[in-house]
Each structure stands twice: as structure tokens, then as C-alpha cells.
Image (spheres, rainbow, N blue to C red):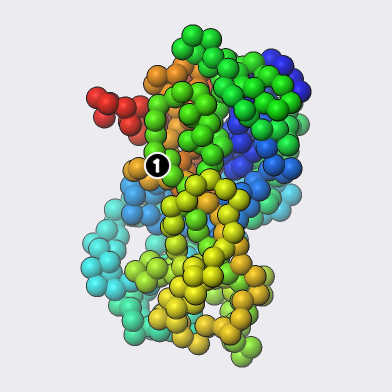
Amino acid sequence: MKRHTEIVIVGGGIAGASLAYFLARGGATDVVLLEREAQAGHHATGRSAAMLAELDSVPTLLELKTASAGFFREPPASFSDQPILTRSGLLVPLRGDWWRALVDMADTLAAHGLTIEQWSADDLRRVVPLLDAERFEGAAFLPEDGRIDVHELLSSYLRHAKRAGILTEYHTTVRAIVREGERCVGVRTDAGEVRARWVVNAAGAWASEIGQLAAASSIALVPHRRTIAIFDPPSDVDVRSWPFVSCEQDGVYFAPESGSMLVCPMDETPVSAHDASPEEQAIAEAFERLGMVAPRLVPRSVRRSWAGLRTFAPDRVPVIGEDPRRPGFFWLAGQGGCGIETSPIVGAVAADLLLTGRSDRFAAERLAPARFSAGVQ
């Protein structure tokens, strides 16, 4: 392992990988990325529903998603071997106050760059015939959104970083953060010590633990388990052209998945950081909720299921920037459920901050860890 470097990144998920890519794009290649698993993206990144869903009730997340969308639709030349995005569309059925809010916000959402259509109940019946259209007054449809090829995205980020000279070390666990006075100056791992000018905390569900090792600011980053199940649709129904359907008000989403269907109860169960596995209760809730919105879709059996951890800050906005009390320690954490779909702008902003101390791409102070410090707004 390299013993001295400019930047050491702790974590090889989508956050660390995208940062490595944008650092390389910025000319910084004296970088080491550390991942304790045998491969990158083993936890949250590899267990996502992999959806670009720009519509979001949190304004900062809405802006981060729309700022990233262009990267997926038209990646840089030679970035990937395969398309990153399949524009299958995002369908959000709504009723009551939620539907009226969408109608009222249509112009505002369009001003943010969203391509959004207002669908009627008849449109719902036509496109997703098994959906109980009587339950909804209408829907938001985002035709330019769709499924992200996470493997292609992650491997492309890392491939370009490695070609530029950035080093990746797997099977490497950080045991301590090395400090001199108040400043972080490296990490101690089970393979030895790496000295660095910057230590980047991109550890996902383990970000709080890494922060504690650095005696950095106390930020309540909490992992939450989310569950997905795969099942077969009715044999007489062709679901291949269906969009991703997110019934937010009923707490369930479903979508075609390689000839089958996936369903999620949109569960957010606070847990400690661990290698997550699905629980039967969450799967049962998924099918119960699916039965409310599309009764004929409910299967008799599950083909497979999995769970992943999504880590949220108290305000559900990512935490990006140097720690206000621990110089040299840089947070890149708390991406919640949108780490993949915001990775282009988040990785680029983080790289800007590390290389120049500022970014023109986004109002970085809205993401800064200092927002959780007393007296900082």
C-alpha cells in the first residue's frame, strides 16, 4: 500500500467512486481509495432500485437530481461502454392535496428543468392497466427519467480514475484516523498507515463511525433499511413497457425488472450499520400495499429479495465539506436514497472543494457539515 498520498478516500461505494473520477478529471491523481469489502459498491450502491427519479419534496435534493440528470442522459464521450440510463419513465399517481399541489407547482417544477406531464386517470389505465386508477385523480409522469445501470456507472467511474493513476485498495479496513494536533493527517488500516493531506469520509452507513474515529463534529447520520422483492407478474400481462410506478401516498413502488417485477414498501427502518438482509415483515408489507393499488399484481410467491441501507442526515440532505472542528477531515456522506442519482453533481462539487476550496456548480454551503454546528445557519 502507498504510504503517502494527497487524498485518501474511505469507502468504495458510489460516493467514493464518483469523487475519485472527478478528482482525476480535475488533474488530481495522487489519491488512494480504500474499501474494506472485496469489491466496490457491495452495500447500498449494489442494492439500489437504480432509478433516476427527479421529482422530490426536498428542494435541495430536487436541485441535486436535476443537476445530475444531464450526465446520465448524455455522459461524457467514452465514459461508459453501455448506456447509463434507460428512459423508461417515472409515474407518480396522486390524489387529494398531493394532486392539487402538483398542479399548483407545475410551472415551478418546469423552471427547475423537469420534463413533467400531468396524466389523467384514463392515462393511468392505458399505460398500467393493472393499476387501480379509481384510487387516483391523476399522476405526474416524467418521461426523461428511468432506470440507471448502476454496475456500468460505478465501474466507469472507477475505470477512468484508475487509468488516471488513482489507486484502489480492497479488503482494507480503517482502524483509526491519524491526527497531529487538531488536524487529520491520515488513516491507520489493518494493512498499515497512509498519510494524507485530506481524509475523505465516504463510508456510507459507517460514516458516523469514521467520524467518531476522527473526533469530528457529531452529525446524526442514521442508516435505514430498505427492502426490495422480485416476483413474477401474471402470465397474461406484458409489463415490459411499464414505467417505474411510485405510489408515494400508499408507500409502495413497483417496476419491471428483467422480465419480472420488483416491489418495495418504501420502508425506512432505523438500524445500526451492518450487512443488511430482508425481513419477512417488510416483504409482507410490500405485497399488502401493492394489493391496495394493483390487486392483480400480487403474487403467490417471491423469487428473491434483498435489503440495503440508506443513510440520512437529520435534514435528509447530503453532508459534503470539511469538518468545522477537524481540519483535513472531509465529509462525503448522508446521501440517503439518492446517492446514485446525485453522484455526478455531488462527486464534482466534492472534488471542487478539495482542490480549490469552492465550487461554482452548486451552493456548497447548503451541503456543508457546518450547518449542524451551534451558531451556524
Q: What residue appears at the point 35 percent right and 34 percent down from the top-left corner?
A: 366
Query: How many numbered marks are there?
Result: 1
Task: Between residue 44 and residue 237, name the one nearer to us.
Answer: 44
Viewport quadrant of the N terminus: top right
SS for callout 1: loop
In-image side of 240 versus 98 (left or right): right
Residue 252: quarter of image: bottom left
> Badge 1 is on which residue?
313
* The C terminus, quarter of image: top left
Residue at 57 percent across and 22 percent down: it is 177
Expressed as whole percent of the image width and height from the top left, the position of residue 18 reads: 60, 38
Q: Nearer the viewer, residue 261 or 352?
A: 261
Residue in front for this viewpoint, 18 or 275: 275
Q: Is residue 363 left or right of residue 242?
A: left
Instruction: Judge left or right: residue 207 versus residue 7.
Output: left
For image coordinates 49% across by 9% down, the residue present is: 181
Residue 47 drawn at (x, y percent)? 60, 56
Q: Who is closer to the viewer here, 139 or 375?
A: 375
